[in-house]
Amino acid sequence: MKNQSSQTLVRRLAGAAFMGILSFSSNAQTNVFDDVIAASPNHTHLEAALIAAGLDDDLQNNAATLTVFAPDDNAFNDLASQLGVTVNDLLNLPDLADILTYHVLGTTVNAAGVTNGAIVTPLFTGNTLKLTKTASNNVYVNHAMVTAADLTAANGVVHSIDAVLMSSETVIDVALDNGFTTLVAAVVQEELVPVLSDPFAQYTVFAPSNTAFDDLAASLNTNIAGLLALPNLDDVLKYHVLGTEVVASAVTNGAVVNPLSTTNSLKLTKTSANAVFVNHASVVTADVQADNGVVHVIDKVVLPVNTVVDVALDNGFTTLATAVIQEELIPALSDPFAQYTVFAPNNAAFDSLAADLNTNIAGLLALPNLDDVLKYHVLGTEVVASAVTNGAVVNPLSTTNSLKLTKTAANAVFVNHASVLTADVQADNGVVHVIDKVVLPVNTVVDVAIDNNFSTLVSAVVKAELVPALSDPFQEFTVFAPTNTAFDNLATTLGTDLNGILNLPNLADILTYHVVSGNVNAADLMNGPVATLNGANIIVNLSNGVKINDATVTMADVEADNGVVHVLDKVILESFLGLDNNEILQAEVYPNPATDKLTISGVNNGEYILLNNLGQKVKSGAIPEGDISIDGLSEGSYLLQLNDGKKTYVTRVIKK
């Protein structure tokens, strides 16, 4: 007595008789069981299984037309090993008949008749079979490769395969059953069905919807046919697949995972609201379960390009990366179709910021405005170092404040007070400039000047390359700021125009003469001399209002986060102190700019003092007969004072 599955098989076969591709003589008596399977020394386990399931008689039916995908003995041995049983145990499986009839079609299909991506229904209807024909004419059924094709008999054809087929619901089935037509077309074309239909693998598939592929086509100015013609399509598809199962609840924020593609890693984000992103793509439907893994539907196609996030991860910016991950900024910064400029503080820059704030890295990560601070380092367009113009004011992703760019005469680049240490680290979605300080979106004395229409003063400060010094958030300055009219009046007095003022050789000295270190409000001013950043004194006179030298303070106490600004009606000059030509040393300092040393000519006794733009002494000593070494100083502008005890010489020097 045949079992129920065998009886069902007979009924199915009767309806499929003589429908195959091959034609046989009506008096032929050969059949796929006796003349192919039983006669093969490599299919003894299959023969035994068919007999155990009572299916041998059905395959001997000469009225049938069959295609049998016949697992060889090694295939059965592999299955037993994967299940942790013996081959004899397989022959006693309760669903053995279903497993075997999943290998049989009720029509004849020769290898030449297989079309890539064909989906056919076997006699066991628990799942379909997915056929693959590769460019090299290899044929696969699900994950099994046809190792010997077209073994013919009167009632059909046998294809020997290297794996036992299981009717599991794989990640391929999930894509087919849920309308992912573009993804399926791509997977079929790139011959990935055999890999993804392996019932004993475990995958996580980030599956872009059809709309995601449409959006990618639009971004690339093409169509779906154009996407299917991409030379790296295979790599793009593998970039969406992990070789392990990760459900949404197991995703950790900031995880960097390796997909089947080895071109790049995937960056996972889990937000505080439990939304999940893979790179810039949002998971819109999570945890569609398959027997060999899980599928997460995403709203964008992810591409294995090198983004600004990769630059940070690959170059040891651990603190920056930790902060970006915590603030959930990876999805934005890993967008392959955005263009960014990232001013990336190195680890030492964050350490310095922590010290300035009297905290540690954990304290920085707890800052309530950390998101804004990070966005303050990013421009929404690409700007390479060669394109930076001195004095450019640019808007970052943060809307709290603008960034002020400086390019010095020696081609050094600053963003606010931070120096670009390494420029133009290229990414596919922008450029990264490594900086030595964290820039903060605070309101500095530079902002006060910019925001209150001190256009001539701002132009002068930019020309003299003083923006980096004055935008330092951890220094405090008192700035006596001449109005535009004050500069116009100075130009008239000197018989020139504003361009002439900006080209004065001692412009930096004039400007630093208007700046005092520290935050001094008008109420705290005292009569008498006060030292400025250029080393000379100004005279404060409080007898009738507030006067600085011969200029009147017309508006006091305009507060900034790093100091205070007092508005003057006149540009103040050192000549107010009565320093005439007889009191000035006749000296010469060269070369200027210089790289490693300064040579002094015209004076060989007395002392020298070298000040930075903050008015801080960086070097001093006796005026030598030889040279002053500046080899250990940072690039930038310095003030050199020479004094022989009676006369003084002051000049601005550039270290490059």
Image: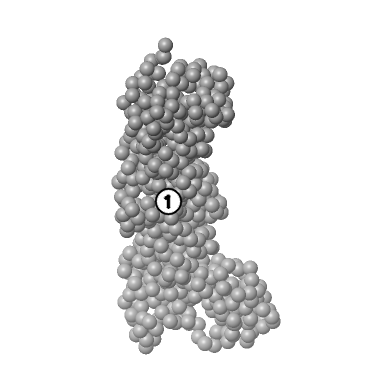
| 541 w.r.t. 244: above or below | below
What residue would you read off at disc 1? 233
Residue 518 in the image, given as x and y percentages of width and height: 47, 61
Give the residue type that dot 1 points to: Leu
| 289 w.r.t. 524: above or below | above
Q: Nearer the viewer, residue 574 or 205?
A: 205
Q: In the rendered image, which quarter is residue 454 located in?
A: bottom left
Q: In the rendered image, which quarter is residue 494 located in?
A: bottom left
Residue 35 in the image, given as x and y percentages of width and height: 49, 28
Residue 614 in the image, given as x and y percentages of width and height: 51, 66
Q: Which residue lies at the image location 34% right of the left edge and 72% below the top edge? A: 455
| 505 w.r.t. 197: above or below | below
Instruction: Specify the farthest residue to the top.
Output: 1
Q: Is residue 324 visible?
A: no
**433 left or right of 175 in image:** right
Image quadrant occupied by the C terminus: bottom right
Q: How many neighbours does mark 1 have within 10 angstroms: few (below 14), some (14-19), or many (20 or more)?
A: some
Image quadrant occupied by the N terminus: top left
Q: Which residue lies at the image location 32% right of the left edge and 42% below the top edge? A: 181
Q: Nearer the viewer, residue 653 or 348?
A: 348
Q: Which residue lies at the image location 37% right of the left edge and 21% below the top edge? A: 9
**161 left or right of 285 in image:** right
Residue 127 in the image, given as x and y percentages of width and height: 37, 29
Number of dots carrying numbers: 1
Instruction: Specify the farthest residue to the front.
Output: 27
Q: Nearer the viewer, residue 256 or 551?
A: 256
Instruction: Specify the farthest residue to the right.
Output: 625
| 252 w.r.t. 5: above or below | below
**59 left or right of 594 in image:** left
